[in-house]
Image (cartoon, grey):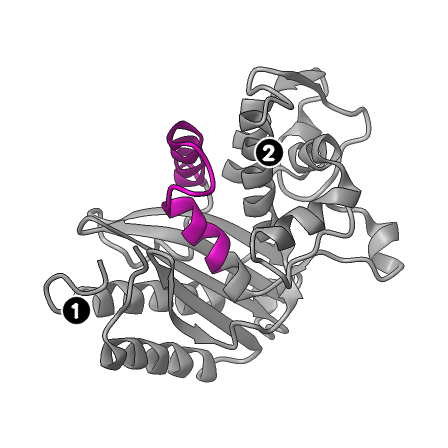
């Protein structure tokens, strides 16, 4: 059943998110969904570099292939000799030559391992991924190159998405149409083991479970996830680019952490003001 928030509550949340975005430098986009319905979108259709949020879609596609019998979670996959830089641990573990798909997916999400991600890209087939993502409804999301392929990036190929698309993909994971219950639960569990928690979960209490995926490049800081509380699953996608904070041009998150944390807090607080039974 599609979730509908009362108009005045959805408008209030959208206004708060718009204020959060307007108060900061850079480009900001937010999208909130629950139960198959769009609740609020602020610049949600603005295309931005996806960074590691593209890994959510790759997780979904890989589990769809497992369900279709095209691969198995215990399939041993080769770890290439040439290992992608950036985030992750496989570049430091030269003795690891193979890994089961399940562990590759865990590394791709939990520590945002770029080498593990490229293994998944190669498994799925680079040329087919964008069309499959678009078929899920995320029509502005494209994967045009492997992670950390600097030559491809210099040639103009990039991986892009929108807050609306990211929220849609995660919202699909909260329903029953995308994957079987076992595969859906595995996807949620993997997202729940995210190791980078300085953004969306930072202002949330221990009674809220955050299943999410961060993304970052120079001047770019994202976080997209599912907030579970009070028996509900509310999706928030927060994307940003052109950030001026020096921390976002190195290894820090800077003020972007506060912005994304404030957005998540606003989502939870507004959801908790809904009339009994509304939005569920």
Quadrant of the drawing holding the C terminus: bottom left
> Eyeballing the image, is 21 above or below 236?
below
The residue that disc 2 covers is 62
Residue 131 point in image, percent of width and height: 70, 50
Does residue 223 appear in the picture of this structure?
Answer: no
Identify the element where label 1 is drawn: loop
Residue 275 point in image, percent of width and height: 12, 69
Residue 11, located in which quarter of the rendered image?
bottom left
Residue 19 point in image, percent of width and height: 39, 83
The residue that disc 1 covers is 274
Look at the image and say whether residue 189 sits in the magenta stretch.
Answer: yes
The residue nearer to you, when weighing 37 against 81, is 37
> Eyeballing the image, is 215 above or below 68?
below
Q: Residues within 10 Å of mark 1 (few under 14, many from 20)?
A: some
Q: Which residues are magenta?
A: 167-194
The residue depicted at 64 percent of the width and 63 percent of the height is 140
> Eyeballing the image, is 142 above or below 193?
below
The residue nearer to you, when weighing 65 against 155, is 65
Q: Name the N-terminal-most of marks 2 and 1.
A: 2
> Eyeballing the image, is 229 above or below 11?
above
The residue depicted at 22 percent of the width and 53 percent of the height is 205
- Main SS of the magenta part reads helix
Look at the image and say whether residue 26 sits in the magenta stretch.
Answer: no
Residue 34, located in which quarter of the rendered image?
bottom left
Does residue 52 appear in the picture of this structure?
Answer: yes
Residue 210 point in image, percent of width and height: 34, 48
Residue most extreme to the left: 276
């Amino acid at each position: 059943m599609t979730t509908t928030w009362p108009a005045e509550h959805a408008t209030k949340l959208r206004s708060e998110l718009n204020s959060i975005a307007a108060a900061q430098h850079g480009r900001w986009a937010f999208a909130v969904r629950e139960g198959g319905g769009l609740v609020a979108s602020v610049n949600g259709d603005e295309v931005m570099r996806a960074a590691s949020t593209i890994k959510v879609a790759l997780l979904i596609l890989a589990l769809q292939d497992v369900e279709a019998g095209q691969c198995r979670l215990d399939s041993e996959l080769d770890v290439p000799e040439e290992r992608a830089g950036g985030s992750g641990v496989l570049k430091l573990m030269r003795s690891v030559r193979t890994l089961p798909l399940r562990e590759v997916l865990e590394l791709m999400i939990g520590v945002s391992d770029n080498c593990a991600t490229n293994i998944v890209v190669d498994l799925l087939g680079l040329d087919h991924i964008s069309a499959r993502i678009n078929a899920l409804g995320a029509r502005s999301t494209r994967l045009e190159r492997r992670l950390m392929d600097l030559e491809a990036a210099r040639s103009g190929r990039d991986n892009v998405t929108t807050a609306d698309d990211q929220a849609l993909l995660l919202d699909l994971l909260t329903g029953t149409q995308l994957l079987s219950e076992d595969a859906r639960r595995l996807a949620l569990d993997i997202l729940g083991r995210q190791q980078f928690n300085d953004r969306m979960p930072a202002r949330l209490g221990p009674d809220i479970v955050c299943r999410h995926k961060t993304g970052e490049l120079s001047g770019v800081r994202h976080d997209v996830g599912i907030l579970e509380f009070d028996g509900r699953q509310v999706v928030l996608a927060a994307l940003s680019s052109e950030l001026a904070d020096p921390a976002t041009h190195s290894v820090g998150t800077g003020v972007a952490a506060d912005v994304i944390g404030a957005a998540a807090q606003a989502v939870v607080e507004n959801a908790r003001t809904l009339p009994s039974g509304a939005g569920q």
